[in-house]
Amino acid sequence: MTKKSILIIDDDNSTRMLLGFLLKQHYTVTTKKDGIEAMLWLNEGNIPDLILLDMSMPRLSGYNFLQNLRKSGFFKEIPVIIVSGTDRLKDIEFFLQNDLNDFLPKPFNPQNLFSKVEAALATHSVD
């Protein structure tokens, strides 16, 4: 049985490293520092089982990345969990309008991270 794959997109190196460290024992993890790197990686034919996405990033923000992802024929079904420090109402409304699977506030509890990841993967399993 192959491991499920997770794409982590966050411009903060320490957050990428922490998420990768926590998840790599159970999943195949790829990390990208912004939305442009992630879109290029996806366009190379890579399709992860789940995306963990930060919203505040340079070049291509999480907002724009998520909108592009949901408009794409190839990638629109990939579940996305937002990992963000925001709790603004307009941000939460945006998440709901763009088929967000879940929201994980920063700083996060590792157990909460695993619960949300497992739930998103179970809901969108294609096995």
Image (cartoon, grey):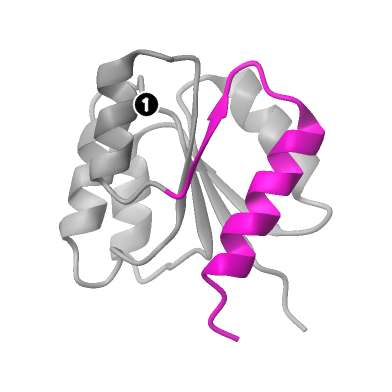
From this view, report whether residue 35 is shown above or below residue 71.
above
Q: Residues within 10 Å of mark 1 (few under 14, many from 20)?
A: many
* Residue 48 forms part of the magenta stretch: no
From this view, report whether residue 86 is shown above or below residue 50.
above
**Residue 53 in picture, x, y percent from top left:** 45, 37
State the residue position of label 1. Answer: 55
Residue 49 visible to the viewer: yes
Quick one: quadrant of the N terminus? bottom right
Q: Kindly state the secondary structure of the residue where label 1 is placed.
A: loop
Say which residue appears at 76% left-offset and 50% top-offset.
24
Q: In which quarter of the image is residue 57?
A: top left
The residues colored magenta run 101-127
Residue 61 visible to the viewer: no
Quick one: quadrant of the C terminus? bottom right
From this view, report whether residue 109 is shown above or below residue 21.
above
Seen from the viewer's position, the closer of residues 8 and 36 is 8
Say which residue appears at 30% left-offset and 23% top-offset.
91
- In the picture provided, is 85 more to the left or to the right than 37? right
**Residue 61 in picture, x, y percent from top left:** 27, 28
From this view, report whether residue 50 is shown above or below residue 82.
below
Q: Quadrant of residue 11?
A: top left
Seen from the viewer's position, the closer of residues 101 and 3 is 101
* Residue 123 forms part of the magenta stretch: yes
Q: How many numbered discs sit on the rendered protein?
A: 1
Say which residue appears at 35% left-offset and 13% top-offset.
88
- In the picture provided, is 28 more to the left or to the right than 49? right
**Amino acid identity at mark 1:** Met
**Residue 16 in picture, x, y percent from top left:** 60, 31
- In the picture provided, is 107 more to the left or to the right than 67? right
Q: Quadrant of residue 21?
A: top right
Say which residue appears at 15% left-offset and 58% top-offset.
71
**Residue 110 in picture, x, y percent from top left:** 78, 32
